[in-house]
Amino acid sequence: MASGGAGGYPGGPGGVLPGPHLVVDRLARRFGPRWAVAGVSFTLAPGDALMITGANGSGKSTLLRCLATALTVHQGRILLDGQELWANRDDLRARIGWLAHQLQLYEDLSPTQNLEILGRLSGASLDIAALLRRVGLDPDRRDPVRALSAGMRRRAAIARLLARDPDLVLLDEPFTALDPSGRALLLEVLHDLRARGASLILATHLPGTAAKVCNTAIHLDLGRIAWSGAAHEHPGVEE
């Protein structure tokens, strides 16, 4: 079993945070006869950040999709602050922010318009200009998402995630398409989320980058945890 680091995130209030925030208990999901996720367990305290690595097809994205309630689970359970996620998914979904590999943006609309729609649908009053500036985008730029570079699209998707003010943040290959300045900005955003008590889960092929913000890690092989430990001790992180 993997778990959050002792004492939680040192940047949190008083250096000690309560736990657990998230419990994943023997989670399993299959596609036909094949188990894509097979008996995965871990716990996270508020402010913990978990890095998930593994080869393509190891179960990383499937695990995130289960946690985002985009896929049902066939065995095991997920608890968010003691509440069973699937039994309470309509209430708990609003607390989960998910940056999927396929960005959930309206391609024909600008980043500003995407956030305006999100605000109307959620009933939230959003400071759209501040959200876009936070990720390095110009709020006055009206180009549709489809006209933006891949890196700018990902920044717009990160702004959309921040607008939800999530307690649990799920990120599938979040550093894809970002240049060095974009990666540095994303790491800063993720550190800020941890400092306010959000729990993060990052599926990534870049453990060296992810370890700059994560305190714990697991490596998946054929849907099972093959290794777990502190993020800085991950075999893929160079000294």
Image: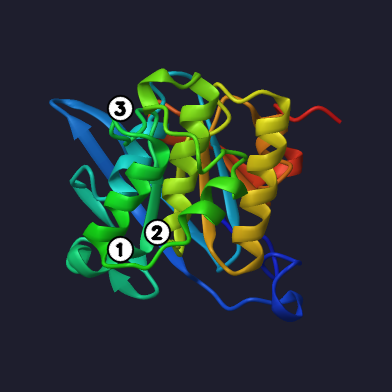
Can residue 167 be seen here?
yes
Give the label, 3 or 1, closer to the camera.
Answer: 3
Q: Earlier in the sequence, mark 2 or mark 1?
A: 1
Q: Where is residue 190? Give x, y as percent.
A: 62, 51
Give the label, 2 or 1, closer to the camera.
Answer: 2
Q: Residue furthest right?
A: 239
- Asked if labels 1 and 2 touch by Cβ distance under 8 angstroms, the answer is yes
Amino acid bearing label 3: Glu
Residue annotated with mark 3: 107
- Asked if labels 1 and 3 touch by Cβ distance under 8 angstroms, the answer is no
Q: CA distance from mark 3 to mark 1?
A: 23 Å
Question: Is 96 drawn above or below residue 217 in the view shown?
Answer: below
Q: In the image, what residue occupies the spot 46% across and 54% down? A: 128
Mark 2 neighbour class, 10 Å CA radius: few under 14, some 14 to 19, many 20 or more: some
Residue nearer the viewer, 99 or 210 = 99
- SS category of the residue bearing label 3: loop
Give the label, 2 or 3, closer to the camera.
Answer: 3
Amino acid bearing label 1: Ala
Residue annotated with mark 2: 164
Q: How is the image coloured?
A: rainbow
Q: In the image, what residue occupies the spot 42% across and 27% down? A: 143
Residue annotated with mark 1: 94
Q: Where is residue 221? Give x, y as percent.
A: 46, 27
Residue nearer the viewer, 34 or 155 = 155
Q: Horizontally, is 57 left or right of 46 in the view?
A: left
Q: In the image, what residue occupies the spot 68% across and 41% down? A: 185
- SS category of the residue bearing label 1: helix
- The quarter of the picture where residue 184 lies is top right
Question: Is 211 drawn above or below residue 85 in the view shown?
Answer: above
